[in-house]
């Protein structure tokens, strides 16, 4: 348990000094589908419903439902808000971004009696882009600490290695501890033969802002077919590409007047990740009666063969009377590697209430401890952390849609359980959505509002020295889809 707890705080909840850790594996394995306004209005529970371009990302069997060709596009507005509670101090922040839920083309080919083969009524082909994840967020944490400083953790690390020299510090810890040492925030006490810092027992106001942005999108090429209006099946080749940026600034300011020399420090970190992968999806929908549809889909692991991280950091130190004030910069870090995300399976059910509406439900299986890193260097320790720290959570989605002449009213709810073993963190996510739309013969439009809430604990550094910040992350999205049938 202690090992998992330490892993969580160092690898999951902060920008790493050296990247490619278990938190990256979870970030790129855990998918919160975007897609069309209709798809999101039903909280993504469309695996047994079909008939929407976005389903080729979850159950490509739904492509077989189409009986006409169409083009659609989905822009959206996203507003994220966060609230943190650290040592009794509450802080808030927010961020606004614009994105694209999907852009899709579907080509439907009816098979007339002369060309009908084995009862196949329609052959459908689709290609386009679907949003897989949105990484935009901003968190601000602030609070008084009267027990430790981030530098306390640094000197404890150094003092656990008797005889470590400045050259060794620079070689082993170029992105964090070396910066503090070279900025005179850490010094060697020759009287006691150990490394020290001025605020070892705290007495500082601590702040941290974390801004993330970027997204994971997937180019998709899909095929679907309709067999006698009873069985719909299809397959998708997906090429996901991701870009992730994280920028954080951590600071400490002296509040205890008995502290000598030290006044203020700031520690800035930047991480940038790009990657391209490939996967395969197959699915079907079976309609035993007009009032019920049963769906199932499997997704192979995504293999990201071209992942690249780049990171850097700097630290500014300020002392009394402006003595020794300086800024230290790290070298530029970069690394190429590969990542395999877990296998995924989806089961779904939809009840069709005549021409009036539908009710749908969906279960998604993901076992996040199956993710693995690959590179020339050994990732055995990190891959073991992944196995020890993650699990398969309960992921459920529900949706309903009702028809009023040419209009539709819809709503949805999603629950994504915590991916962490042994309650080392929360990570639970709730989603609620609602919207309406118009369906004409050749044109349709949909509008949806989506609300999400995620909770997580965040440690500024070693949890043996610092209390967690209890964070709540909220998002509000307005999603619009326009489509043309032909």
Image: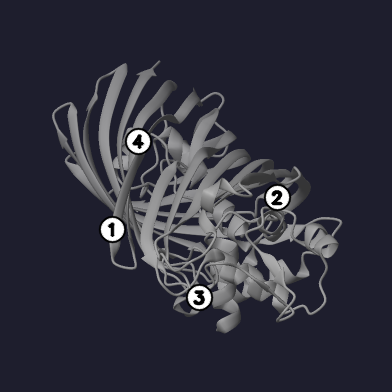
Q: CA distance from mark 2 to mark 4?
A: 29 Å
Sequence-wise, the earlier of marks 3 and 4 is 4
Task: Please identify the quarter of the rendering in which residue 172 is found.
Answer: bottom right
Q: CA distance from mark 4 to mark 1?
A: 23 Å
Q: Is residue 112 visible?
A: no
* Element class at badge 3: loop
Q: Which mark is residue 303?
A: 2
Sequence-wise, the earlier of marks 2 and 4 is 4
Q: CA distance from mark 3 to mark 1?
A: 20 Å
Sequence-wise, the earlier of marks 3 and 1 is 1
* Element class at badge 2: strand
Which residue ends up furthest to the left in the rendered image? 404
The nearer-to-camera label among 2 and 1 is 1
Q: Could you say where residue 486 lies in the image, as x and y percent from the top left?
A: 40, 15
* Element class at badge 1: strand
Q: CA distance from mark 2 to mark 1?
A: 41 Å
Residue identifier under label 4: 78
The nearer-to-camera label among 3 and 4 is 3
Residue at position x 56%, y 83% in the image: 2
The nearer-to-camera label among 4 and 1 is 1
Residue at position x 77%, y 47% in the image: 335
Residue identifier under label 1: 90
Residue at position x 55%, y 60% in the image: 261
Instruction: Pick the residue in front: 454 or 246.
Output: 246
């Amino acid at each position: 348990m202690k090992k998992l707890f330490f892993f969580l705080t160092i690898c999951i909840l902060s920008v790493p000094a050296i990247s490619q850790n278990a938190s990256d594996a979870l970030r790129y394995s855990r998918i919160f589908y975007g897609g069309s306004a209709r798809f999101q209005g039903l909280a993504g529970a469309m695996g047994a419903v079909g008939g929407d371009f976005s389903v080729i990302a979850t159950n490509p069997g739904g492509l077989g439902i189409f009986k006409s060709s169409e083009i659609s596009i989905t822009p959206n507005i996203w507003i994220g808000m966060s609230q943190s509670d650290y040592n009794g101090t509450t802080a808030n922040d927010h961020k606004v971004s614009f994105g694209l839920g999907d852009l899709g083309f579907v080509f439907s080919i009816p098979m007339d009696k002369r060309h009908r083969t084995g009862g196949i009524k329609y052959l459908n082909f689709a290609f386009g882009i679907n949003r897989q994840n949105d990484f935009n967020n901003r968190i601000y944490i602030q609070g008084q600490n009267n027990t430790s400083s981030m530098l306390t953790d640094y000197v404890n690390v150094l003092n656990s290695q008797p005889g470590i020299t400045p050259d060794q510090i620079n070689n082993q810890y170029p992105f964090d501890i070396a910066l503090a040492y070279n900025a005179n925030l850490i010094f060697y006490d020759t009287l006691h033969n150990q490394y020290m810092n001025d605020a070892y027992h705290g007495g500082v106001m601590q702040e941290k802002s974390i801004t993330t942005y970027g997204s994971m999108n997937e180019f998709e090429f899909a095929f679907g077919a309709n067999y006698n209006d009873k069985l719909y099946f299809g397959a998708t080749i997906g090429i996901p590409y991701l870009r992730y940026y994280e920028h954080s600034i951590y600071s400490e300011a002296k509040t205890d007047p008995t502290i000598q020399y030290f006044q203020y420090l700031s520690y800035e970190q930047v991480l940038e990740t790009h990657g391209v992968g490939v996967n395969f999806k197959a699915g079907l929908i079976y309609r035993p009666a007009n009032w019920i549809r049963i769906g199932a889909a499997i997704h192979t692991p995504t293999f990201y063969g071209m992942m690249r991280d780049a990171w850097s950091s700097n630290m500014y130190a300020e002392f009394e009377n402006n003595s020794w004030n300086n800024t230290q910069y790290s070298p530029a870090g970069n690394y190429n590697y590969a990542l395999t995300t877990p296998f995924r399976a989806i089961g779904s059910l939809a009840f069709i209430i005549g021409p009036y509406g539908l009710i749908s439900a969906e279960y998604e299986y993901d076992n996040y401890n199956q993710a693995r890193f690959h590179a020339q260097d050994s990732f055995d320790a990190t891959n073991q952390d992944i196995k020890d720290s993650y699990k398969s959570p309960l992921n459920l989605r529900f949706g309903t849609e009702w028809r009023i002449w040419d209009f539709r009213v819809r709503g949805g709810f999603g629950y994504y359980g915590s991916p962490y073993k042994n309650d080392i963190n929360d990570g639970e996510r709730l989603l609620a959505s609602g919207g309406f739309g118009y369906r004409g013969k050749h044109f349709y439009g949909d509008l949806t509002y989506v609300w999400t809430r995620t909770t997580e604990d965040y440690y500024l550094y070693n949890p043996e020295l610092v209390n967690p910040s209890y964070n709540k992350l909220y998002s509000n999205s307005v999603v619009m889809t326009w489509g043309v049938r032909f």
